[in-house]
């Protein structure tokens, strides 16, 4: 009887030891995003009035607090009366926390509603604190009277004013179509 009791206690000890949760020590560090959000639709306001609306399908925040928007980003700027003055879109974007700047990339378009002008480029940087955008890349500006091609641009964030660094050519248009 004593042997069976000892055998039982020994068996019970092995079961407890085998089932005991072991702490696994790992030297691997998590290298993924700090957070991921989907269905982003944010409105920024100043003194209780909307100044900007930002829409994107996905936002990934890194450990450095940068934000990556791997899908299309759209921005709408509002005037003091709440009217949309310009629209911006890009295939993707990246917010750099350290410089408080956004870089929009891939088929970037800025449309100034009041002037009826459109800017197209592959990439531009937006500095919200300075309320301006710029690019070093080739641009095409479609106005009501001409299409202007150039390289490099500095502009107000709402595209109300802009200057090309280098004009490469200009084509006059009639009703938005190039003249012969």
Image: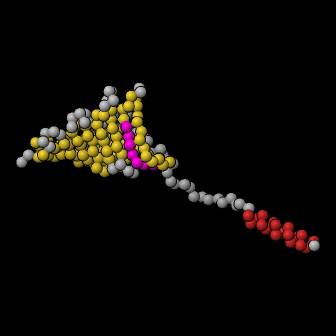
Q: Is residue 58 magenta?
A: yes
Q: Nearer the viewer, residue 70 or 138?
A: 70
Residue 13 showing in the rendered view: yes
The image quarter containing residue 112 is top left
Image quadrant occupied by the N terminus: bottom right
Please give left or right for residue 9 compared with residue 112 in the image: right
Residue 79 percent location from the top left of the image: 31, 30
Q: Which residues are magenta?
A: 53-61
Query: Residue at left 30%, top 36%?
Result: 157
Please give left or right for residue 30 compared with residue 103 in the image: right
Secondary structure mainly formed by the magenta segment = strand
Given the current orientation, which residue lies at the most extreme left position? 180
Given the current orientation, which residue lies at the most extreme right position? 1
Residue 130 percent location from the top left of the image: 34, 33
Query: Residue at left 33%, top 50%?
Result: 91
Residue 100 percent location from the top left of the image: 40, 39
The image quarter containing residue 77 is top left
Please give left or right for residue 94 compared with residue 118 in the image: right
Q: Nearer the viewer, residue 8 or 96?
A: 8
Query: Residue at left 36%, top 35%?
Result: 52
Q: Nearer the viewer, residue 22 or 144?
A: 144
Please give left or right for residue 20 compared with residue 26 in the image: right
Q: Is residue 107 magenta?
A: no
Residue 56 percent location from the top left of the image: 39, 46
Query: Residue at left 24%, top 43%?
Result: 119
């Amino acid at each position: 009887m004593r042997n069976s009791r000892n055998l039982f206690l020994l068996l019970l000890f092995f079961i407890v030891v085998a089932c005991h949760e072991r702490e696994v020590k790992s030297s691997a560090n998590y290298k993924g995003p700090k957070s991921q959000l989907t269905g982003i639709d944010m409105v920024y306001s100043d003194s209780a009035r909307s100044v900007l609306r930002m829409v994107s399908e996905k936002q990934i925040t890194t450990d450095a607090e940068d934000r990556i928007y791997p899908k299309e980003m759209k921005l709408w700027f509002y005037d003091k009366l709440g009217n949309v003055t310009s629209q911006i879109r890009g295939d993707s974007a990246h917010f750099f926390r350290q410089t408080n700047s956004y870089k929009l990339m891939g088929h970037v378009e800025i449309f100034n509603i009041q002037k009826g002008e459109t800017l197209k480029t592959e990439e531009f940087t937006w500095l919200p604190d300075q309320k301006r955008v710029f690019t070093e890349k080739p641009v095409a500006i479609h106005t009501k009277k001409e299409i202007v091609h150039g390289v490099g641009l500095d502009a107000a964030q709402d595209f109300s004013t802009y200057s090309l660094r280098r004009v490469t050519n200009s084509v006059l248009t009639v009703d938005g179509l190039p003249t012969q």
